[in-house]
Amino acid sequence: MSERDRDRERERERAEAGRPRIRLDLPRPPRRKLVPEYDPEAFGRLSEKIARFLGTGRFIVWMTVVIILWVVWNVSMPASLRFDEYPFIFLTLALSLQASYAAPLILLAQNRQDDRDRVNLEQDRKQNERSMSDTEYLTREIAALRMGLGEVATRDWIRSELQDMVKDMDERFDVFPPEQTGRPALARDEGDRR
């Protein structure tokens, strides 16, 4: 009988005896919670939608229309059809309830927006740092290339040097023409090569 089979048999005996074995290699079963669970992201998205609607002109217009109809109905209708007499306590209660829910929802939406802005700002900052380091690297590379090119003989520099040498040779020929030296020009060139 293998070790694994013995462990299973012992576990079965404990289960039959009413003592379940506590296994450390398995997660505990989830506990029941007294507080209902909710998805904070879904609640946050809902609060943002409500906050966006509360901040529109459409909401203000509809709320104004409802309040005007409420007041006109409760002032002009017969007493038997009125549901909120003059001090409009029920209207005040409804508006207070709406404000008490609107303020935290708006704050929650603002906090979520602040979190998004903070993340975006951090990403922008990192991107700017990368861009700055890339720019500095490219600047150093360009400077190194310029320094390297300063030491390299370019076509124009070689051409100008050759032209200077040709001018020097022409001046020498003017000062010491080949006829005065008694040597032909080719012999002089051969002597210069040695």
Image (cartoon, helix red, strand yellow):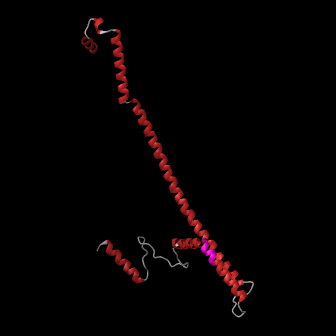
Give how far across and how far down residue 156 sits, in percent.
37, 29
Q: Can residue 63 be seen?
A: yes
10 vs 131: above or below = below
Q: Residue at x 36, y 13 (%)?
A: 171
> Which of the 4 image quarters holds residue 76?
bottom right
149 on left or right of 93: left
114 vs 101: above or below = above
Give how far across and how far down residue 30 sits, in percent.
47, 76
Tell me the quarter of the image containing the C terminus. top left
- Within the magenta stretch, is there residue 60? yes
Tell me the quarter of the image containing the N terminus. bottom left
Give how far across and how far down residue 41 sits, in percent.
51, 71
106 on left or right of 120: right
Q: Residue at x 44, y 42 (%)?
A: 138
Q: Report how many numbered discs are placed on residues in the image.
A: 0
Instruction: Give the extent of the magenta segment.
Output: 54-62
- Within the magenta stretch, is there residue 4? no
Look at the magenta stretch and give its main secondary structure.
helix
Q: Nearer the viewer, residue 154 or 160?
A: 160
Q: Nearer the viewer, residue 155 or 48?
A: 155
Q: Residue at x 25, y 9 (%)?
A: 184
> Which of the 4 image quarters holds residue 115?
bottom right
> Which of the 4 image quarters holds residue 107?
bottom right
193 vs 72: above or below = above
Q: Can residue 101 be seen?
A: no
